[in-house]
Amino acid sequence: MNTVRTAAVVLAAVSALALSACGPSEDGASDAGSTAPSAGSSPSGAPSKPSAAPKAPSASATPPAPSASSPATSPSASATDADFDVFPCSTYDVTFTAHLAEPTTSSYLLKITNSSGKACRALGHPVVTFGDLDGQATQRGEAPGIEDALRLEPGESAYAGLLGGSHDGTGSTVDSIALTMDTESDLEQKPLTASTPGLYVSPTVNSVTPWVDNAEDALSL
């Protein structure tokens, strides 16, 4: 009887040990269910490392070629005036005529033509004197600067309008006028003459326009 009781006690003890080995731990976590973090995972809350560092640009990279729409500038190019050698016209470069345009006012159309073999510029106003009278025609209208003055190629012409005066008894009549060119220098010139029969010269009226490239403008300024 004692033997049976002893065996029952031993069996109960063994069963209790087996149950305690398989049961939950004191903190409630199952030892069998807990798993260690894998080698590739990060601890909770820690930032993960980038998989690969960004590649640096290659030192041999070729810069982009300039666009075809952006013209290249030559370092040897210099800003030069294409007309630098085009000098003012003198009376040695031109021929001169005068034609009656308005009889009632004794107005004349003056015309010069480049008869030289090179281009020249008709600067400012013509310098007009009247026969053997003293003085010259006053300037009417504003002339362009030397850089914008009318350029005459060989054979091309320029025009100016000479306004006469009415017969008010204060002036004189002349049959010719003389012309020289404005050269903005002291260049000596030979005056060019033209016939102007019955031109009445008034002390206060006679005036001349700057050189222009057409007769209509010369007579309307």
Image: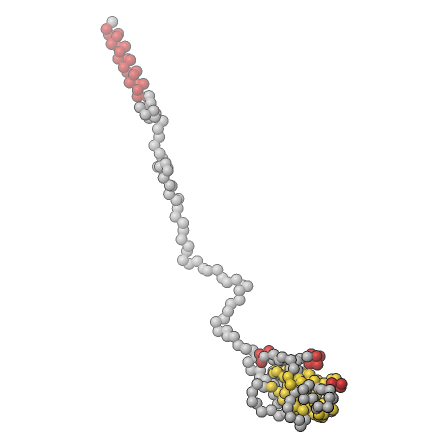
Q: Residue at x 35, y 37 (%)?
A: 43
Q: Nearer the viewer, residue 188 or 198?
A: 198
> What is the x, y in percent for residue 215?
70, 81
Q: Residue at x 31, y 23 (%)?
A: 26
Q: Nearer the viewer, residue 218 or 105?
A: 105
Name the quarter where the C terminus is drawn: bottom right
- The answer to whether one can see residue 111 in this image is no
Q: Residue at x 70, y 81 (%)?
A: 219
- The answer to whether one can see residue 58 in this image is yes
> In the rendered image, which quarter is residue 1 located in?
top left
Question: Hey, which residue is sitting farthest bottom in the picture?
Answer: 132
> What is the x, y in percent for residue 56?
40, 53
> What is the x, y in percent for residue 150?
62, 80
> In the rendered image, which quarter is residue 16 located in?
top left
Q: Residue at x 71, y 86 (%)?
A: 164
Q: Nearer the viewer, residue 155 or 87?
A: 87
